[in-house]
Image (spheres, rainbow, N blue to C red):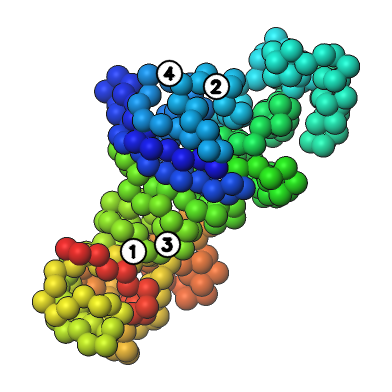
Amino acid sequence: MIRLEGVSLTLGSFSLGGIDLSIGEGEHFFVIGPSGAGKTILLEAIAGIHPGAGGRVILGGRDVSGLPPERRGIALVYQDYGLFPHLTVAENIAFGLMTRGRPRWEIVPMVESLIAQFGIGPLSGRHPGSLSGGEKQRVALARALATDPPILLLDEPFAAIDPQLREQFMADLRTLRREKGLTIVQVSHSREEVFALADRAAVLIGGSVRQVGSREEVFRRPVSVEVARFTGFENVFPGQVLSSHSGHAEIRIGGLVLSAHTTFPTGSRVMVCIRGEDVTLAPGPGNGEDCLPGVITGISEGEHGVRVRADTGVPIVVHLAKREFREQGYQSGDYVAICIDPAVVHMLPG
């Protein structure tokens, strides 16, 4: 459905470099990456916002590289929604239809249908300045879908939505995609959104695509240290394979030895990557299998869990659920067992 071939663009000091991507019809595809990676610019390149972009954009088998946005059959919804402040909700939704020359007798029932679908009837005569973030999002999506585009581009659509509303909007988006057969490309910083909605994701760093894959591949099997750090591997260490046999290996990290499942041969220098939520703690010294003795050096409590810093010869970050943390009563200075299942150790060439 969407194919990018060597898409490039320079804006000031930033360069989007030679992007190659294929996105299937009906796919919900995510573009993730740190701030300043070029995610929004990539959406704009697909939409045709920047006429100076190089490479080819092919939509539904048609090369649209030289076409303006209005001839590409794409709807783009920005993070700030881009609603016209001087128009009412109904007029905002009708805008795309009006610019395409649709007669009023067609526009009115189409707008009324979208207003009903998105449950925004009481808002139809109001202006955007009087709407909440969630209301603006519904209006922006209704406006984007008014022209019945096969492709929907979303730039962090849930960023301004209260957490309690986010789940409902994600469900709405799943329903829209299924009912309309939409192909969706969505920019996000949220791992939760990726796991809830994505078929596949691309990691964009510094204007280049570093990895494309399923949710599991991107978040569990990153192809580089850079991708690993971005996708949440807080524990990344250089190491060396001491022994390797039948898919099982012993890895030296500083003065420690960890077990891992890997095919790296003996003597290989590697980068060892472990997610904080995959490390477990137990009270007392660690002498059991796959457990190391350590001491808690710091504790940071967040909204959804607790981040524990421990030292076992190398610094280790552990993420615990609040309930587990409180039940165990961990404190800084406690001696603990730091346990790492070999199956959760991801290794990259060093």
Position of residue 141 measured from the top left corner of the image (x, y, whole percent): 68, 32
Residue 85 visible here: yes
Marks 3, 4: nearer the viewer: 4
According to the picture, the residue beneath numbered tag 1 turns out to be 317
Closer to the chain start, of discs 3 and 2, is 2
* Mark 3 → mark 2, Cα distance in angstroms: 33 Å
Q: Amino acid at mark 3?
A: Glu
According to the picture, the residue beneath numbered tag 4 turns out to be 51
Marks 3, 2: nearer the viewer: 2
* Mark 3 → mark 4, Cα distance in angstroms: 34 Å
According to the picture, the residue beneath numbered tag 3 turns out to be 217
The residue sitting at 37% across, 73% down in the picture is 344
Q: Are marks 3 and 2 in contact (CB under 8 Å)?
A: no
Residue 32 visible here: no
Position of residue 244 measured from the top left corner of the image (x, y, whole percent): 20, 84
Closer to the chain start, of discs 3 and 4, is 4
Q: Amino acid at mark 1?
A: Val
Marks 1, 3: nearer the viewer: 3
* Mark 4 → mark 1, Cα distance in angstroms: 46 Å
Q: Residues within 10 Å of mark 4 (few under 14, many from 20)?
A: some
Q: Determine the secondary structure under disc 3.
A: helix
Is 326 left or right of 179, judged from the image as shown? Answer: left
